[in-house]
Every structure is written in C-alpha cells, then in structure tokens.
Amino acid sequence: MEMRASVVALMAAAMLATSCAAPDAAFTNIYMADFHSDEPANCRTSDVPQSHGKAQEFFSRARQVDYKTLHDNYELAPCYVEGTLNRQGKSCDWQIRAGATGSVQCGEQKLYFACDSCNDLFGAK
C-alpha cells in the first residue's frame, strides 16, 4: 500500500511539473507573410507550407534541434516561407524551408526545428 502511495505521489508530482511548465517553443498567432526562393526554377511556392494553419502544424510537429544537428542532418532548401509569431508574449520572425526545417528568431535568440513527419505539409518533390 505504501509503495502504491509513493508511485501515485510521484506521478502526481510529474504531472503537476509538466502542466505548469510551458514548452519552450509554444507559439501563437502564426502569420505567414512571404515566400522567397534562391532557385525559382527548382524551388517553388508549391514546395513549402502554403497557409497559416500549415505553418502552425509544422511548428507543433517539429522538434527543436541545435544548429549542428540541423546543418549535419538536414537539407538547407533554397526556398522558404516566412512570417511572424508570438512566443512568450513577444513578436518573433520565423522561416520554414522546403526541406522540412525551420527557425524562429526572437531578438538575439534563434531556435532551429526539423520535422521528420511533416511531408503532408509540403508539396510533392
């Protein structure tokens, strides 16, 4: 009985800690503003998410990675969409590239993202 009480107390503490801690990458008010391509013949608007909702979905599915992981393991596609979002009450700029990678710039801090389960958000390659 004492063991069960300890397990229940531990689980309750873990749930409380996770429910109070907002995820580092909690983004709201995602607005898509523009599309850019360094290779318009090879990388087009159809290769990136094309709505505010798809951008929101990208950031909800993507995992935050460090720059080295992004650089070493993912393609830096020559086109991207960009816009603004809110993070922790501050306005930030974001980009999502055709290679299913992204970044968020909040002041001096830059966060990097990769999504291995977002193919449905991007056009056919």
Image: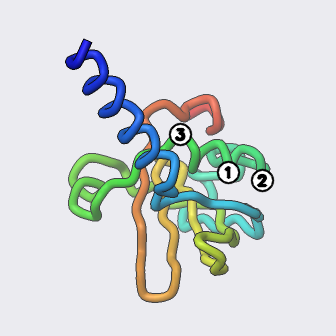
**What amino acid is found at the position of numbered circle 3 in the picture?**
Arg
Dots 2, 1 in contact, CB < 8 A: yes
Q: Quadrant of residue 120?
A: top right
Tell me: 21 left or right of 52: left
The residue at 59%/68% (across/down) is: 94
Alpha carbons under labels 3 and 1: distance apart: 10 Å
| Placement of 112 over or under 98, stated as above or below | below
User: Residue 55: which disc?
Assistant: 1
Q: Is 53 left, or right, of 47 in this rendering?
A: right
Task: Residue 76: give x, y in percent of width and height.
Answer: 39, 57
Q: In the rendered structure, which amino acid carries the disc numbered 1?
A: Ala
Q: Residue at x 40, y 62 (%)?
A: 112
Give the residue pinned by disc 3. Answer: 61
Quarter the C terminus occupies: top right
**Dot 2: element:** helix
> Which dot, 3 or 1, sits closer to the camera?
3
Q: Residue furthest front?
A: 1
* Residue at numbered disc 2: 52
Residue 25, position as x, y percentages in the image: 50, 59
